Image (cartoon, grey):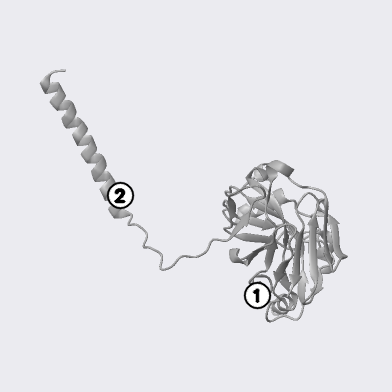
């Protein structure tokens, strides 16, 4: 390469580098770095069975009245009504390890505290307008959960035509077991789901009794929200929800998953 050619190449390369640096500088100036947070917030996580890593929780979605008999006991028509959803805060999670009985505080402001046993699906990925046929591709695994409910507050706010978030979304309102990855158990579409209070079975059904399957729930939710990794879905409860009091021991059981046990304190 001649001296002139070498100088020309270096000049061009230097010009390109300068242009790239200038572009980067302008972009950085146009997109200022986010200000540092005033303080750090804890990240809600759920353990994964057999894994060192934990699953970070972004949002908790819950479906209402997803078993026909439960819909009827709540005064709804399970045939005609489309699915509806509500949310709980991520820090409502109360993790209970298999074989343990978690102490669950009886909440304030209620005299009618109810249990609801549910299959919980946790998402590894998400998106918008997810087709039902691809929905389960986004599921990382499953857990046994309880949607604890201040029923008197829920009904009272409903009677007033007001949002009943206060009846569903509160501290410790989402007890849950560690997650079992779907690669180990597949995607449960049938199997016994039940809840016992002081060893007496109150709720019992089969997962196949769901009105809307987990795949259908994901498809419906993704029409209203952009689902993302870290989202979890409480998939509805069977009939015979009922009250609990301090001292009661609840045991939730779903075929193929760890049991969930709590004591109301």
Q: Secondary structure at mark 2?
A: helix
- One can see residue 222 in this view: yes
Name the residue located 77 percent from the left edge and 65 percent from the top edge: 116
Name the residue located 86 percent from the left edge and 65 percent from the top edge: 199
Tell me the quadrant of the picture where the C terminus can be found: bottom right
- One can see residue 186 in this view: no
Task: Mark 2: give few (<14), some (14-19) or many (20+) Cα within 10 Å.
Answer: few
Residue ranking furthest to the right: 200
Residue ranking furthest to the top: 1
Q: 189 or 265: nearer the eye?
A: 265
Give the residue number, with chain letter if any, for mark 1: 166
Q: 227 or 254: nearer the eye?
A: 254
Q: Residue 233: where, in percent of width, then height?
A: 67, 56
Q: Is residue 183 above or below residue 103?
A: above
Q: 167 or 172: nearer the eye?
A: 172
Give the residue number, with chain letter if any, for mark 2: 27
Name the residue located 19 percent from the left edge and 34 percent from the top edge: 14
Q: Is residue 244 above or below residue 130?
A: below
């Amino acid at each position: 390469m001649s001296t002139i050619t070498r100088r020309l190449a270096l000049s061009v390369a230097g010009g390109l580098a300068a242009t790239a640096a200038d572009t980067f500088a302008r972009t950085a100036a146009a997109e200022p770095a986010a200000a540092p947070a005033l303080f750090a917030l804890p990240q809600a996580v759920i353990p994964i069975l057999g894994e060192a890593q934990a699953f970070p929780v972004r949002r908790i979605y819950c479906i209402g009245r997803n078993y026909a008999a439960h819909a009827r006991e709540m005064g709804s028509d399970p045939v005609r009504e489309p699915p509806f959803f509500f949310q709980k805060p991520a820090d409502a999670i109360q993790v209970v390890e298999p074989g343990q009985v978690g102490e669950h505080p009886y909440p304030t402001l209620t005299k009618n505290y109810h249990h609801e046993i549910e299959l919980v699906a946790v998402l590894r990925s998400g998106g918008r307008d997810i087709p039902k046929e691809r929905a389960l591709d986004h599921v990382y695994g499953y857990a046994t959960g309880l949607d604890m409910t201040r029923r008197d507050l829920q009904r009272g706010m409903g009677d007033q035509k007001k949002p009943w978030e206060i009846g569903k979304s509160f501290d410790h309102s989402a007890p849950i077991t560690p997650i079992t990855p779907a690669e180990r158990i597949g995607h449960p579409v049938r199997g016994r789901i039940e809840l016992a209070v002081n060893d007496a079975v109150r709720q019992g059904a089969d997962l196949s009794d769901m009105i809307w399957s987990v795949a259908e729930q994901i498809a419906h939710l993704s029409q209203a929200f952009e689902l993302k990794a870290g989202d979890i879905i409480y998939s509805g409860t069977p009939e015979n929800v009922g009250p609990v009091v301090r001292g009661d021991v609840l045991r939730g059981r779903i075929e193929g998953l760890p049991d969930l046990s709590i004591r109301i304190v």
